[in-house]
Amino acid sequence: MIFIIIITTILYALLIGFFVIGFNRVKTFEETFLRNQTRFTIIVPFRNEEENLPDLIKSLENLNYSKNHFEVIFVDDDSTDNSVELCSRLLSYSQLDFKIIKNKRKSNSPKKDAITTAINKAKYYWISTTDADCEVPNRWLETCNSFINSEDVAMIVAPVTYTSTETFFKQFQTLDILSLQAATIAGFGLSVPFLCNGANFLYRKDLFEELNGFDNNNDIASGDDIFLLEKAVKKYPRLVKYLKSENAIVQSKAENSLSNLIQQRIRWAAKTSNYKNTFGKFVGSLVLLMNALIVITLFLSVFGLFNWVYFVGFLILKLSVDYVLIAKSAKFFSQTSLLSSYFFSGLLYPFFSVFIAFKAMFSKYKWKGRSFKK
């Protein structure tokens, strides 16, 4: 057991160390002033989002970008609340070029179907996806336009964080997404991109079509972002880049209940076994093993089967190396105040992650009122 712990800890510490190096290698994008040149189609799939759509629409209306240079396609995925009516009413008073269309279901993945349905109706060359529970910054498209005209790029992964941090429960979730964002940025810095978030994801329409969209993973309900990223990285690795800019940060909402959080994380975890990226699989396996060893050694220590001193040292080392990376992410996202909750979040996280991994292996999950198998 000691040997396994030592080897795992060394590998984990090296991984986080490399992540810190990778994070630093991705330079913050310095924008140059450009007139609105790029035209965007923004795609928003939604199902039962009447509480969130007003905030998203307001943020889209406030975009500092010519309304003639982007359109917004809202895709209704069989909402049973007043989402469609509310969306239509709010948009009727706006100056946005918009469409509200029905999702055309063809697979086991409603969201992938919704994005594909919208792309088939998109007018413009660049596709941008976000979620209905998000808010986009007013310089979002302006920054993306500058990046597109400054870089040789066909796909852009951009930053996402949570806004609601008034309770420890939401702070825990935000620290978690900050760690995922740190790993995302680091992957690009190490030239092994393996993560992205569909709430802030851009790509050329012709690239989507060349990659045959979501073919070969339509049987998996989630993963509209990761699997498309894997395809693009495999075919055009130099054309996939990360936009590290505070003006491009999309803000999403943390879950309001533990049951919703568990279902969300099970959905995220359920797709990992289908990853084709070797580095991504290695990272996921090593992180899970490290967390599992924390849980196992704690229980062994309680029953006198493992030395408490070794357990405490093991835990402190993990918390310390994780802190270095998360602190960098928190600084970039201007959320350093959350670090005051890091210690207790770090203590809880191993148990939470192991529980989610176990549940994802053996149970279905619910998403937007529907049940899905792994």
Image (cartoon, helix red, strand yellow):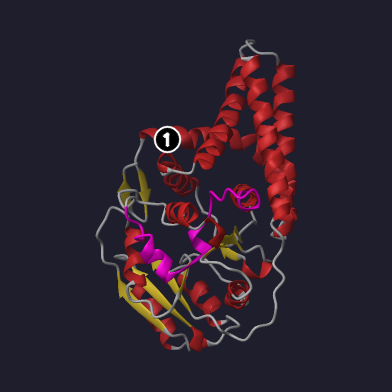
SS state under label 1? helix
The reply to whether the magenta stretch includes residue 141 is no
Identify the residue at image location x=35%, y=74%: 84
Q: Nearer the viewer, residue 248 or 233?
A: 233
Left or right for 249, reference 285: right
Specify the segment rendered in magenta: 187-215
**Is 270 left or right of 236, judged from the image as shown?**
left
Q: Nearer the viewer, residue 222 or 215?
A: 215
Badge 1: residue crowd in 10 Å (few <14, some 14–19, many ≥20): some
Q: Is residue 129 above or below residue 266?
A: below
Residue 151 falls in which quadrant of the image?
A: bottom right
Q: Position of residue 368 (x, y in %)?
A: 37, 56
Q: Residue at x 60, y 76 (%)?
A: 149
- On the image, the x and y values in percent for residue 98 come to 41, 82
Determine which residue is flagged by label 1. Answer: 359
Residue drawn at 52 percent across, 78 percent down: 60
Residue 339 at x, y percent in the picture: 73, 48
